[in-house]
């Protein structure tokens, strides 16, 4: 049971570059989420998706783009990476929707230099 | 005021001790409450949901106090493997959408 997997696990990129973080889930959960986790902050929601082809902004969406052409995949793209986007990114999925229990991938540790 | 507040700790306890964490939340309309566990450099994992009547799972007991807007987690007979950060999570609403609001966590260190 693979669950939810993220790739890459670690990424170093330069300011201004585009980078895509991948997320794949095998549970067929309708809802998927992207969070970032930074020191001093709880996890913050970047984008979420209620189903294939349905995405919406979370609390901190600026500088990020998502797509969801298939239920199982939810990639997150940083269009032009900035140092403030250095963070740990977690993808998550949920069977019952927003505001309900979510299950997380292993995380991607992104450093923008 | 933060939506979810936790004592960051660390709580240093010996093996076998009982330890309790509290968490306060500001949104009185919150309906769902959870405790997650996060090991160093790992993903958060759901530990338990918190129900109005309280619930117990082995050595772990969670309580909800709606009047005072706090939830608690009690760990009995602490094990070395309980060392982790415990995240209090509450559902809330941002302009137009529900969301999970995560506390910044309480760190627990269990020593031999």
Image (cartoon, coloured by chain):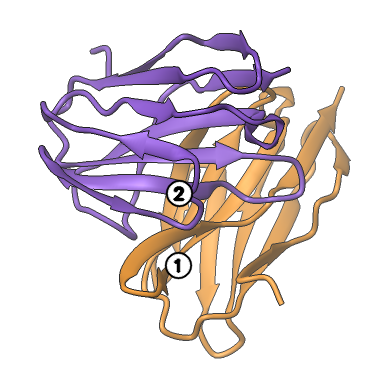
Task: Say which element carries label 1.
Answer: loop
Residue A12 location, x and y as percent? Answer: 63, 10
User: Can you say whether A111 is above or below A8 in the image?
Assistant: below
Q: Which mark is residue B9?
A: none
Marks 1 and 2, how far apart in space?
36 Å
In the rendered image, the quadrant that contains the C terminus of chain B is top right
Q: Judge whether residue A103 can be spotted in this image.
A: no
Q: Residue furthest bottom?
A: B67
* Nearest to the observer: residue A65 or residue A1: A65
* Front one among A94 and B47: A94
Left/right placement of residue B71 relative to residue A40 reads left
Quadrant in which residue B79 is drawn: top right
Can residue B69 be seen in the rendering of this structure? Answer: yes
Q: Position of residue B39 (x, y in %)?
A: 64, 27
**Chain letter behind tag 1:** B
Question: Who's the residue at 55% across and 39% down the image?
Answer: A36
Residue name at image x 70 percent, y 30 percent: A83
Residue beneath disc 1: B54
Image quadrant in which you'd find residue A3: top left
Q: Which residue is mark 2?
A: A61
Numbered disc total: 2
């Amino acid at each position: 049971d693979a669950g939810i997997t993220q790739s890459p696990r670690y990424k170093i990129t330069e300011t201004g570059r585009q980078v895509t973080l991948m997320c794949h889930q095998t549970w067929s959960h309708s809802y998927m989420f992207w969070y970032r986790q930074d020191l001093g902050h709880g996890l913050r929601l970047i984008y979420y998706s209620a189903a294939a082809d349905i995405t919406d902004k979370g609390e901190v969406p600026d500088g990020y783009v998502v797509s969801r052409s298939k239920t199982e995949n939810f990639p997150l793209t940083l269009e032009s990476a900035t140092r403030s986007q250095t963070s740990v990114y977690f993808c998550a999925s949920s069977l019952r929707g927003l505001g309900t229990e979510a299950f997380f991938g292993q995380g991607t540790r992104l450093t923008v230099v | 005021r933060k939506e979810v507040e936790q004592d960051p700790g660390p709580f240093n306890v010996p093996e076998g001790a009982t330890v309790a964490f509290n968490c306060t939340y500001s949104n009185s309309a919150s309906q769902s409450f959870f405790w997650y566990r996060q090991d160093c450099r790992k993903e958060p994992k759901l530990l338990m949901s918190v129900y109005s009547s309280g619930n117990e799972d082995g050595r772990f007991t969670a309580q909800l106090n709606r009047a005072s807007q706090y939830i608690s987690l009690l760990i009995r007979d602490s094990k070395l493997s309980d060392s982790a950060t415990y995240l209090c999570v509450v559902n809330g609403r941002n302009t137009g959408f529900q969301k999970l609001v995560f506390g910044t966590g309480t760190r627990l260190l269990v020593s031999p």
